[in-house]
Amino acid sequence: MKITVLSGGVGGARFTRGLLAHLATTRSDRGGGTSAEVTVIANTGDDMWLHGVRICPDLDTLMYTLGGGVHEDQGWGRAGESRRTSSELSHYDVDSEWFTLGDLDLATHLARTGLLRSGQTLSQVTERLCRRWEPGVRLLPMTDQEVETHVVVDAAAGGTRLLHFEEWWVRHRAALPARAFVQVGLESASAAPGVVAALLDADVVVLPPSNPVVSIGTILAVPGIWEALVATAAPVVGISPIVGGAAVRGMADACLRAIGVETSAAAVARHYGRREAGGVLDAWLIDTVDADAAAGLRSDGWRVGVAPTLMTDVPATAEIAARALKLVVTGHPA
Amino acid sequence: MKITVLSGGVGGARFTRGLLAHLATTRSDRGGGTSAEVTVIANTGDDMWLHGVRICPDLDTLMYTLGGGVHEDQGWGRAGESRRTSSELSHYDVDSEWFTLGDLDLATHLARTGLLRSGQTLSQVTERLCRRWEPGVRLLPMTDQEVETHVVVDAAAGGTRLLHFEEWWVRHRAALPARAFVQVGLESASAAPGVVAALLDADVVVLPPSNPVVSIGTILAVPGIWEALVATAAPVVGISPIVGGAAVRGMADACLRAIGVETSAAAVARHYGRREAGGVLDAWLIDTVDADAAAGLRSDGWRVGVAPTLMTDVPATAEIAARALKLVVTGHPA
């Protein structure tokens, strides 16, 4: 079975880890007879240049989480991290305080930057870095071009200005009202090699509980990707990142507000849309606390699953992945 | 008194620190009546891009030595350094083992790279970094353009190939016979702002005991610098980096051999040349162990000083600076 996942950072990485755990169980239950290949298409809209190095937060979170190196409580960055370089950098007057470059994490940025500067594409570099992390999936950036999400915020004089997403998210904790999101560089970008094929050739496509606006929304905005999702014969199932009217993690509400979507499991489903109605989803998994929303969605023709969706640990997350697959794969064990 | 020093890394930095110590003594002896301004023109031929960051070994050694942050025994790099990032980088297959990026040192490279990438010149960046180190001198890169010393070495098939100087020096410990040195980028380079003026307006110019080939030789090769040294009214005094037929530090003999110059105090003097004879020196300070060489040089018209020249500590180095200045500045206290 070929499974393709569209992923942001922490939520998508944790979901994918659970998915791999579920698939491992399924394989052993069946005596190793079923093999599944998982491809993860990662958002790179949060990527940025900082102090001359290229930082790819979502790719890094995916590598570290799936490769066993992530700071578990934090959900991103490295376990056992230290901040010697970052602390030293603060002695130079170079606006370095808001984004912490951990010493271990920095090695990834340096390796990546050196390879990019030598002319390799982000896809090639990602494959190279994955040789160290062995994430158990094929990890693809959504695009090899630099597409950076910026946030339109109010300026002092009554106008607006653009902030890089990471600056808005990390430095300002998403507290400045976002008027809109802009993917700078999108018009000259295309899906990275293998991305469209991974959608067209998939048996199932999964939208994990990542941020629907700035993570999955950005991936869907890359020319060719939405079209491939619409065209693929594979069913597409999503897991709601909104539970009980709040983002499970992060500040997705600030992002949804900016695009005029209510922070609810049903509203996010309708934002993605049903494939029959021109959207991208065939099925939607929501949390048991949102069971009330299921009836309304179903009456509008949605295939909806209801289950506990909090990714409290790997076994719980494996169970969520099983439930999601069962929604769209006939006979799949849940 | 305006003093301009042409400097490489460790030798030039230690000499300059001694010079400043000497000048401080002179000032206090005279009740603060004499003020001296020191400008250091630094070799940037050893600079390189590594893992996407810009490394300027000689500028860094000068900042750290004069700013009180240097690893004293080593002569370069930071005191209290650690290697977390570098050690982590070795897990990626990116040829990272030969050059150690210390965690503290890396902060300098990142600050510099970010500023360079934002469009600032190396001169501007150096001034900015010096705000933190307060080296007590005006520190100028020899040029704002990228001029990188490469070494011509034998290739396997009987031809030759180019190695970046740092790779030859650090990775191969200068053990591969150097056929020649090439300053890549020199033809489109010019002296950095302030460099020519610092030579023309100087009261004294000093060539410290830096490597005469790849440090001072590279500075002299930058268009405009040799001409300014020939034209300046200031006397030019050099201190021999060769004592008793060997380089005091480093592998200058391998560099001298490549350009066909004997490793001796007299041969290096003749390599620089007397200004009256088209060279750049007015006077040359050699070590007491090389006293025999003084007669020969003097009979050829050289002004030669003989003194202990080993920079064993700051007071000893201050004394060497005093002796050098006394050779060319009438009435200067030694």
Image (tube, coloured by chain):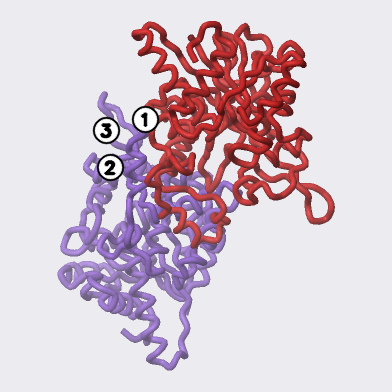
Chain colours: A red, B purple
The residue to which callout 1 is attached is A132
Q: Do tags 3 and 2 sit on the same chain?
A: yes
SS class, disc 1:
helix
Q: Give the residue displayed 56% in from the left and 57% down from the top.
A: A94
Callout 3 amino acid: Asp
Q: Where is residue B296? Give x, y as percent.
A: 20, 67
Give the chain of mark 3.
Answer: B
The subunit carrying tag 1 is A
For the residues bearing labels 2 and 1, Cβ distance under 8 angstroms: no
Indicate the quadrant where residue A45 lies: top right
Looking at this rendering, what residue extends furthest in the bottom direction? Answer: B31
The spot of residue A275 in percent (x, y) is 71, 13
Residue at image mark 3: B154
Q: In the image, what residue type sits under mark 2?
A: Arg
Q: Is residue A99 above or below residue A44?
A: below
The disc label shown at residue B23, or none: none
Q: CA distance from mark 2 to mark 1?
A: 24 Å
- N-terminal-most mark, 3 or 2: 3
Residue at (33% x, 32% y) in the render: B161
Q: What's the distance in space between the residues labelled 3 and 2, CA to CA?
A: 16 Å
Which residue occupies the foreground of this view, A46 or A307? A307
Residues at discs 3 and 2 in contact (Cβ within 8 Å): no
The residue at which mark 2 appears reads as B171
Crowding around mark 2 (Cα neighbors within 10 Å: few <14, some 14 to 19, many 20+) is: few
Percent x, y of residue B61: 37, 60
